[in-house]
Amino acid sequence: MTTQQIDYCIEAARTLNFSRAADNLFVSQPTFSYQIRLLEEEIGFPIFERNGKGAVLTPAGAQFVSFLTGLRQDLGRAIEQGQNFSAKYKDSISVCMMVRQALYFLPEAMKLFEESCPDVQITPVFRYENSMETFLRNDADIVFALKEQTRQVAGIEIHDLFESRIYLIAGRDDPLAGRNLITEEDLYGRTLMIGGGSPPALRSVQHRLIGSGKINCFNSADHDTTLTNVAAGRGVCLAPGFLNDHSGQFAWIPFDCPESFSCVLCTHREDQRESLKTFLGILKKLYRDAVAFPL
């Protein structure tokens, strides 16, 4: 399958007329029809049903063209990004994380890095799940992770970044929103959102609270669903501080517990680029200097 055949197929699906589609793409109608036929032979099913008035998509063809349209758009974006990169940059460093707010100081680090290494691009990569797997497949140069995720992982270097404590998330109008510290007793009689892939340290706290028998629980599929429920007044939740986007939409109040999260950056041991070391140094300094910043 060629990009030319993809373009022919998409245009034929748009016009439902091979002659008009061929004219639009400045090729002869026999050449156009031949390429469509070659494509159908390759994939093993008819995309179009021809008739005297033009052509109609088969059910399988309609599904196939929908996929091709998305593929062509992705390819176009990839080409544009490649053109932008080649025009300005000589190298690239990709940083993988589960959500944007996990590395709050990343935008500032990118600005500072560009001053010293203007020909190296920093590319954020977001994987809500399997970010470590993405990194281990060499699809990212740096990954944000919890130190517990890095145990017994070979071939990587671990760079300590910051400690993140546990916070209670509540609506701004919640009676708990004005507190400076939340204790277990403050949650008695309340509904606590749990689940959604919580890390072990957080699950430990959740189970301890639910085990008291004085706190109701409500299972939530993921963090975004949990925040939606909190905004709707259906309960409160506990979360690592590194998930705080500092938008002010919710109240994030420190929760009184010993558990915390050791947040680290991982790089591939064989990657010893000076630009990578420079970027890591900038990011670590930003967090080191943010002594009073809630994490």
Image (tube, helix red, strand yellow):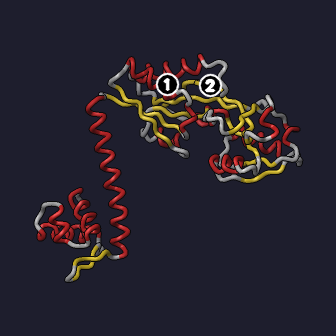
Residue at figure coordinates x 79%, y 28% from the top left: 180
Residue at figure coordinates x 37%, y 62% from the top left: 67
Q: Quadrant of the C terminus?
A: top right
Q: Can you identify the residue that label 2 sits on?
A: 162
Which one is closest to the eye, mark 1 or mark 2?
Answer: 1
Whether 22 is drawn above or below 150: the answer is: below
Q: Amino acid at mark 2?
A: Phe
Residue at figure coordinates x 48%, y 22% from the top left: 280
Q: Can you identify the residue that label 1 sits on?
A: 108
Local packing at callout 2 (Cα closer than 10 Å; few below 14, some 14-19, many 20+) is: some
Whether 104 is drawn above or below 29: the answer is: above
The x and y percentages for residue 30 are 11, 70
Front-most of residues 181 and 281: 181
Front-most of residues 24 and 286: 24
Answer left or right for 27 relative to 225: left
Q: Quadrant of the N terminus?
A: bottom left
The x and y percentages for residue 45 are 30, 74
Q: Residue furthest front?
A: 173
Q: Amino acid at mark 1?
A: Glu
Q: Which mark is residue 166?
A: none
- Label 1, label 2: how many angstroms apart (C-alpha)? 17 Å
Residue at figure coordinates x 20%, y 67% from the top left: 21
The x and y percentages for residue 143 are 51, 34
> N-terminal of the two: label 1 or label 2?
1
Answer left or right for 278 relative to 258: left
